[in-house]
Image (cartoon, helix red, strand yellow):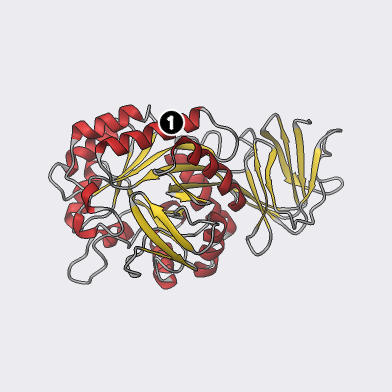
């Protein structure tokens, strides 16, 4: 098998702009050349290279999903190491080349077990998207904004529990979602910052002043902007208002048109710009698996089309959104550029995962991880380390 690849003719999305009809060369799993294709303008692939004719397609850096609960029928917390391995293969269909396995509120022993399973699955990786670490969504959140989180798993901050979880994560817990207004909330933020974990504000009743105190303590992120947090009110500005206004917060946003109205996504885009927002899916086991009944932790969720709810049919419980569709929706809702979308789906997530020196953008020397998209944002191929890891069976591209 050759260790060289040439992707020719795509619109190549780099941090500096889009190279129309570009060529990207890869060798030994890394990007070795980026430039315009065509005689006299680029360079020729070396003999023996795998050549992908990508004319008319879009080449983006592989997507990194930092808030993600499952895919293809498997749940991050429910299906153990083998389930995580299947999830890593399932998400390739959507251009995702890396993700943070995301927990929900649960008993301490359950969270420890989930973190340990994630670390084991990462260590024993058998192909698929890279497991880049853990996002602990809770358990230290406000029950008043629990959303689809199980009440029995929610509690006030416990620093000893947090230290145990971080120890189990072997330095790979990247994000923790918490409610800063709870007793000990600000101390928890300081502990996370000291440990190199990004504190993310969410599932919270915090008012603007409490959000400012959390930012002062070291909070840098917000979990699914607008959802499960105090909102935007002209006399009582809550956490969502602080997320929109304060430049120190990078906010996740779920661009499925269900969690957040497209006009409010456009508002967030205008307020925050590409470096202030991160595209996430908040996907459940139902991602890519169709309608039916699935699990989210201990809960049963019901899926009908784009809507995931608890059994009450009302409470939204995650999503079936995919990263490629999040890109397409974000561009459609706001008019942002492909370059900005790549920042929100790849570069920004790579930074919080601690891998921006290797992944997240199409630049010389970085890992050859790509999502090759059709003009409608469906995935033609997903490439990891210069190897095609997924190819749409209907693809007409010549290899």
Secondary structure beneath label 1:
helix
Image coordinates of residue 241 in percent, x first then y, are 27, 62
Q: Name which quarter of the figure residue 7 lies in.
A: top right
Does residue 362 appear anywhere in the picture?
yes
Could you tell whether 278 is left or right of 13 in the image?
left
State the residue in front, 110 or 38: 110
Image coordinates of residue 330 in percent, x first then y, are 51, 63
State the residue in front, 64 or 151: 151
For residue 233, above or below residue 382:
below
For residue 276, above or below residue 132:
below
Could you tell whether 156 is left or right of 349 in the image?
left
Residue at position x 33%, y 50% from top? 298
Q: Residue furthest left?
A: 183
Image coordinates of residue 387 in percent, x first then y, are 70, 38
- Residue underneath mark 1: 119
Image coordinates of residue 187 in percent, x first then y, are 18, 38
Could you tell whether 214 is left or right of 136 in the image?
left
- Mark 1, other Cα within 10 Å: few <14 / some 14–19 / many ≥20: many
Residue at position x 18%, y 41% from top? 157
Q: Name which quarter of the figure residue 194 lies in.
A: top left
Does residue 206 appear anywhere in the picture?
no
């Amino acid at each position: 098998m050759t260790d060289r690849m040439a992707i020719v003719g795509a619109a190549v999305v780099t941090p500096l702009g889009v190279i129309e009809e570009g060529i990207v060369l890869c060798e030994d799993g890394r990007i070795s050349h980026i430039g315009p294709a065509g005689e006299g303008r680029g360079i020729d692939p070396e003999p023996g290279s795998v050549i992908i004719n990508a004319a008319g397609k879009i080449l983006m850096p592989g997507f990194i999903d930092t808030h993600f609960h499952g895919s293809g029928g498997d749940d991050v917390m429910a299906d153990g190491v083998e389930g995580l391995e299947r999830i890593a293969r399932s998400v390739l269909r959507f251009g995702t080349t890396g993700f943070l396995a995301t927990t929900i509120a649960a008993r301490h022993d359950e969270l420890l077990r989930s973190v340990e399973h994630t670390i084991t699955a990462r260590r024993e990786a058998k192909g698929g998207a890279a497991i880049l670490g853990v996002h602990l969504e809770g358990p230290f959140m406000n029950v008043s904004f629990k959303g689809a989180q199980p009440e029995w798993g929610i509690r006030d901050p416990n620093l000893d529990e947090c230290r145990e979880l971080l120890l189990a994560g072997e330095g790979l817990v990247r994000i923790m979602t918490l409610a800063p207004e709870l007793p000990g909330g600000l101390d928890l933020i300081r502990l996370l910052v000291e440990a190199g974990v990004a504190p993310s504000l969410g599932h919270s009743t915090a008012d603007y002043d409490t959000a400012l105190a959390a930012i002062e303590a070291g909070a840098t992120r917000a979990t699914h902007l607008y959802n499960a947090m105090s909102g935007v009110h002209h006399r009582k500005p809550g956490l969502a208002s602080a997320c929109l206004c304060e430049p120190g917060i990078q906010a996740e946003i779920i661009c499925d048109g269900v969690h957040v109205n497209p006009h409010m996504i456009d508002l967030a885009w205008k307020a925050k710009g590409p470096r202030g927002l991160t595209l996430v899916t908040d996907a459940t086991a139902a991602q890519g698996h169709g309608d039916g009944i699935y699990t989210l932790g201990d809960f049963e969720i019901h899926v009908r089309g784009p809507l995931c709810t608890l059994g009450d049919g009302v409470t939204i419980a995650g999503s079936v959104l995919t990263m490629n569709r999040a890109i397409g929706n974000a561009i459609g809702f706001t008019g942002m550029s492909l370059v900005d979308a790549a920042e929100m789906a790849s570069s920004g997530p790579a930074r919080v995962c601690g891998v921006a020196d290797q992944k997240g953008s199409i630049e010389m020397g970085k890992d050859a991880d790509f999502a090759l998209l059709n003009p409608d944002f469906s995935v033609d191929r997903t490439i990891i380390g210069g190897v095609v890891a997924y190819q749409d069976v209907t693809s007409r591209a010549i290899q």
